[in-house]
Image (spheres, grey):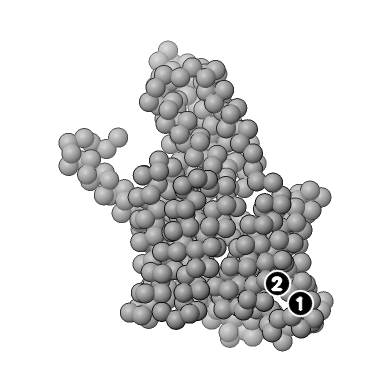
Amino acid sequence: MTFSEILQVITGCIGSFGFALLFNVRGKRLWIAALGGFLSWLIFLLLSRFIESEPINYFIVSFLISIYAEIMARVMKTPTTTFITTSLIPLIPGGSLYYTMAYAFQSDAGRFVEKAVYTLELAAALALGVIAATAFTKLFCNGLRVMGGKAND
Amino acid sequence: MTELLNCAMDIGEQLLVCGAEIHRVEDSVKRICEAFGAVRTDVFIITSSMVVTVHDSNANTCTQTRRIISTGTDFEKIHCLNALSRKICSEQMTVSQIQTELARIAAVKPHPLWAECLFYAIISGAFTLFFGGGFIEAAVALVIGGLIRFAMWVADKTVGNRIFSKFLASFAATALAFAALKLGWVPTVDNMMIGIIMTLIPGIGLTNALRDLFTGDSIAGLLRSIEAVLIALAIAAGYFLFAALGGVVG
């Protein structure tokens, strides 16, 4: 890993921590949120060595981190949103959104449309990953319950 | 029955105000009413309003509505409310016990302004580095990040409109970033702007909106999507206004 990649992982983690503080997450849950931010960018960087398409990478990372959030939420007995919202912060396409805005201002229609579509692709991939993970967790938990003889509650 | 419904509504209202998902709020209200012996509970919740009807075993019904003014996101309160509704469902609690618990949760103080300024500063600085800015740029973004939280506070106190606050914050951030550029402190404004914009953009709002949409809460999902789009436009408008006034982009 290069210096800038290490710096990104660390600052991504600090960013998640900052948002967790802002959203009034407290105690141990604060550290779980920060760890989520750290993991999300680390996994993204590692996967980007194998996956060329950024939106697909976004989807996979968002799925994995949401699973992490679902597990941690059950361990800590707290709503899943706490960890999804904070851990996925480094993946929010802020850079892409800013350049969309800047190109729009420069009346650079070609690059504006290109960036705008790209930003939407990233945002959609992120949301789809979260939704897929939620569905997967429900499937898994209810499946276990059915197999354990207890029908879904 | 009215008292019980009051309790359930109070918990639901607090959850919504603190930014919980619609699905969770509906579920909590329903479970609480059922724990108190409601035969049937009809719950309809969107981001700005709640309508709940409970039916008891004597065929009596009771309906309440609430108008919800959502503020921000407070996961500590959501955590406590969630724990409380679990407790209500698992053990017998009286209405007055629940009210005491609720009062205790309501007393959890939000962060003071200076702390929020500090968090904005940390986030802005961290993401400036994250997006490839240098340490000096990060330091400048840190200061600007803290200042725009203060600007938003002023806007909230005077105008009291969330969209306008974001617009003003974006305008102030652009102005300060270009001022730093003119003073020759930083080579470019881009990385600083991205770092600061990370604190403002509705990325999480949009993700939650899409989640609501896909889990079947279409109306709430649409409302949240529109809010996210409006906020994004407000940020762009703030940036455009300064850039046009100053004529400095290019």
| Image mark for residue B75 | none
Chain under disc 1: B
- At mark 2, the secondary structure is helix
* Residue neighbourhood size for the residue with mark 1, other residues' Cα within 10 Å, grouped as few (<14), some (14–19), many (≥20): some
Residue depicted at x 44% and y 58%: A35
Q: Quadrant of residue B205?
A: bottom right
**Residue that badge 1 annotates:** B180
* Residue B199 x %, y %: 62, 62
The chain carrying label 2 is B
- Residue at position x 51%, y 35% from top? B81
Q: Position of residue A126 (x, y in %)?
A: 44, 64
Q: Amino acid at mark 2?
A: Val
Pointer 2 residue: B140
- Residue B114 appears left or right of B10: right
Asked whether the residues under the numbered discs 2 and 1 touch, taking CB atoms below 8 Å apart as contact, a structural biologist would say: yes
Q: Nearer the viewer, residue A152 or B190?
A: B190
* Residue B131 in the figure: left or right of residue A88: right
Dot 2: few (<14), some (14–19), or many (≥20) neighbours within 10 Å?
many
Viewer-proximal residue among A98 and B69: A98
Callout 1: helix, strand or loop? helix
